[in-house]
Amino acid sequence: MNTSTTPQPLQTGLLFDAERQLWIAAHPDTVHDVLHHPGLRVRPVAEPVPKALAGGPAGEMFGRWLRMSDGAAHQAGKPALRAALQRWTEEHRIELRALVQTSAARRLPFGWPDWMWVTPASSMAQMLGIAVEQADALAPLLRVLAKGFAPGADELAARAAHEAAQTLQGLIAKAPPSRLLRAIRAEGWDDASDVQANLAGLIWQSFEATAALLGNGLVALARDAELARRMRERDADWAALLRQVCRSDAPIQQTRRFAPQPMDVAGTELPAGACIIVVLSGAGTSTFGDGPHACPGQDLALLIARSALQQALHSGMAWPAVDDLRYEPAANLRAPIFANPKVQT
């Protein structure tokens, strides 16, 4: 009997899951091929927005998100947003770090869950000119959106998501023009509705993906006292730590691609409408994705995570309990559920 526990190499090519009637890309080479395939789309042709949200404000906002669209709008907006985010993040790095650390320090007395979920989205909202009190109160609204975006959302969840989308975009519209907005306009992207929707999308991404990165980074520090000690040093390599977290405890575990017509992908002939689950965790691919739909806000997300984790590391607060840790019940998101509801002050 072979009792070896040596990990077996991942199989190249697409693997067919007969039970779910979809394909899976897990090997790094296959993941790369899928994410860079010019013919695959990020949404099914027949369902450009979640069915429950079609025809309402949340569906319209979702449909304008560059990360959820292909074609001319994506080609026009994505380079402008990426360039603006990169330049703006670099030019205002010190100021942005201070904003995030102030937000993190303000939320930590309410407990580690609040610190994890509120800090990234609030920080992003403040960067867009939204007042601190309104930014700190966004988490419940964003959870309502999450329920509306979920597969199988009912009419009640959809109606609440529409109201949440209107509220979120209203806050952005009423805020004074931010430096980021001016940077986007300077790149030539001047479709006001598309820009506003994608600024809301940045807040949404901060709430989900960046919060999960923040939580998984905190888990890494809480589990390894020597690592935490090293990260307190002035020359600590935060970039290396966050890269390791993204590889070993990826916040975004998987993404999807769809074949709009019959096509060859990684040596497999796919029928029209085929769905591919692209496994990001453990595939050597960044949790921020790759190819045309790679996250344009990667540098900003890493800055937010680093700044908040540095604040936590020097706060003197006891680490959260990480034994027998549970995670949010989401297929693509790996976000820890911290047990302590509130830090005693």
Image (cartoon, grey):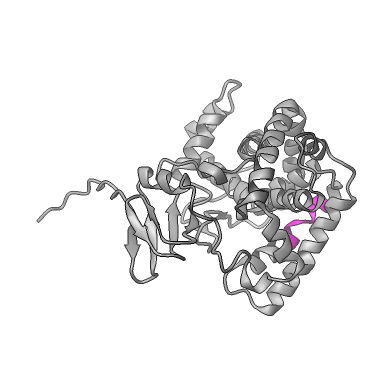
**Left or right of residue 236, residue 140 in this image:** right
The N terminus: image quadrant: bottom left
- For the record, the magenta segment spans 134-141
Residue closer to the observer: 95 or 283? 283
230 above or below 106?
above
**Left or right of residue 237, residue 153 in this image:** right
Q: Which residue is drawn at 60% across and 44% down?
A: 214
**Left or right of residue 70, residue 4 in this image:** left
Q: Which SS type dominates the magenta stretch?
A: helix
257 above or below 284?
below
Q: How many labels does the image show?
A: 0
Residue 164, image x, y percentages:
77, 64
Q: Classify residue 236 by image quadrant.
A: top right
Residue 200, image x, y percentages:
74, 52
Residue 78, image x, y percentages:
65, 43
Residue closer to the observer: 75 or 329? 75
